[in-house]
Amino acid sequence: MGAKTLIIDGQTVSAENHVTILQAATDNGITIPTLCHLDGVYDVGACRLCLVEVKGSTKLFSACTTRVYEGMEVTTQSERLKKYRRMTIELLFAERNHVCAVCVANGHCELQALATSLGMDHVRYDYCFPKWGMDLTHPFLGMDDNRCILCTRCVRACWHIEGAGTKNVAGRGSKSHIISDLNEPWGDSETCTSCAKCLLSCPTGALFHKGDTVGESERDRSKLGYIVNAREKQQWIV
Amino acid sequence: MDRLKVATVWLGGCAGCHMSFLDLDEFLFDVAAQIDLVYSPIVDCKEYPEHVDLCLIEGAVCNEDNLELLHKIRARTKTIVSFGDCAVTGNVPAIRNQLGRDNTTNVLQCAYVENAQENRRVPDATGIVPTLLPLVRPVHELVRVEYFLPGCPPPADRIKAVLVELLAGRAPALTGANLKFG
Ligand code: SF4
Ligand code: SF4
Ligand code: SF4
Ligand code: FES
């Protein structure tokens, strides 16, 4: 089927059938903030940072999971969206224990970078200071629940790129957390191939190489998209 | 015009933010020419004065002394700036909050009994050492704060960007890289 023509932020763009608003925007140089989106795995609309306005509806739509249609009119920047994005990012910080000053991902963290670009100078909600632990049982990888934003990028990378199916989400609401196998110590996992794709996919410092210290967790996340592209389209584009 | 009455305060922090302040180098001469530094860790003054125009607060609110001083500061100060990540987020001092709210059985137990080599007992120096608050809190959760200056510590340039505006009577508005935490 042919292309669709739509308007994003007043700009007329054409997009292939079935692509998402996010993809159409990205292809046309329009940036929408995202956290749970990761090139190479399917989208789940978990973080709500990519919310956009679509003309004709008072509802907001997640750009990563909403398909384009002919004549669609999308607004990606408005005072209302700015307000909600700022609230969302502040809630993410209030929910767990983020101490950027001593974090492995300091300076290489998508959550931190987004807070900066969204103008977050402080968090208006009271911090929860929950008690979470770490899983350091894997020989060379570590998981710190304190820094996890439950984007599930690691889960999707583990299942759909590596095909191992080790990572999963357990619990509900604020008790949700990432587990290995049936909530066993990661080091005891029989399915984990130790490929570290979960680490590569993680936007924060929740997954890390043991031994990395403050600010050392720098990852090239585009490698995952590269693998998938090569596998699915037989294109080896570096 | 009267010179601006400025205070800097050190609550539960490591003094790193004040070190960064001193790192303003020659700009400190410009600042000194425009202000009266009325209260600060580097000024010999015991009591927080009345009618302060501007106060930079370093550190989180960790104990009863911090809290008492904070309320005094708010009552006597026109403009408060949360100075550095500990003041803005709780940062490293607030890591102890995860241990739970009862300090005697949690944080003191952890530090002085579980992880101590000698003299394992929970210290008791009531009246000498200020009592810990059940939770370490960022400044704005307890009193109104006008401006935020994040960073651990905020680099001298960032402090300067805020001071230049405040000294000129304008509202500082940090953006972009100047808002990076950590
Ligand atoms: S994961 Fe990111 S936001 Fe959280 S503490 Fe680390 S650097 Fe900061
Ligand atoms: S290392 Fe690979 S297989 Fe193991 S949990 Fe991570 S993504 Fe899954
Ligand atoms: S561990 Fe990282 S990738 Fe996985 S859900 Fe948490 S933040 Fe996302
Ligand atoms: S990127 Fe769309 S909801 Fe997270």
Image (cartoon, grey):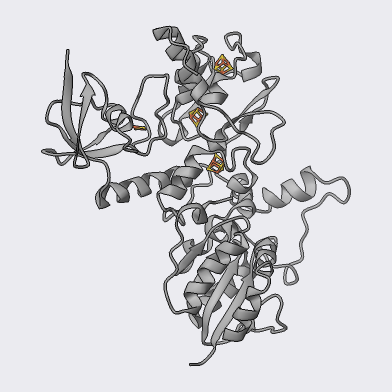
Q: Position of residue B88 (x, y in %)?
A: 53, 59
Q: Nearer the viewer, residue A59 or B104?
A: A59
Q: Is residue A122 above or below residue A106?
A: below
Does residue A174 appear anywhere in the picture?
yes
Q: Nearer the viewer, residue A107 or A29?
A: A29
Taking the image as shown, residue A209 lies to the left or right of residue A148, namely right
Taking the image as shown, residue B96 lies to the left or right of residue B163, namely right
Q: Nearer the viewer, residue A198 or B177?
A: B177
Q: Is residue B126 above or below residue B1?
A: above
Taking the image as shown, residue B2 lies to the left or right of residue A71, namely right
Identify which residue is drawn at 53% across, 38% down.
Answer: A109
Q: In terms of image quarters, where does ligand 4 lie?
A: top left
Asked which quadrant contains residue A114, the reply is top left
Residue at the outermost front position: A237
Does residue A160 appear anywhere in the picture?
no
Q: Position of residue B9 (x, y in %)?
A: 62, 72
Q: Position of residue A139 (x, y in %)?
A: 70, 19
Identify which residue is drawn at 25% across, 49% down.
Answer: A78
Residue at the outermost bottom position: B1
Q: Is residue B20 above or below residue A88?
A: below
Identify which residue is drawn at 29% across, 38% down.
Answer: A51
Q: Position of residue A56 (x, y in %)?
A: 10, 38
Asked which quadrant contains residue A14, the reply is top left
Report how many numbered discs are placed on residues in the image: 0
Q: Quadrant of the N terminus of chain A?
A: top left
Asked which quadrant contains residue B84, the reply is bottom right
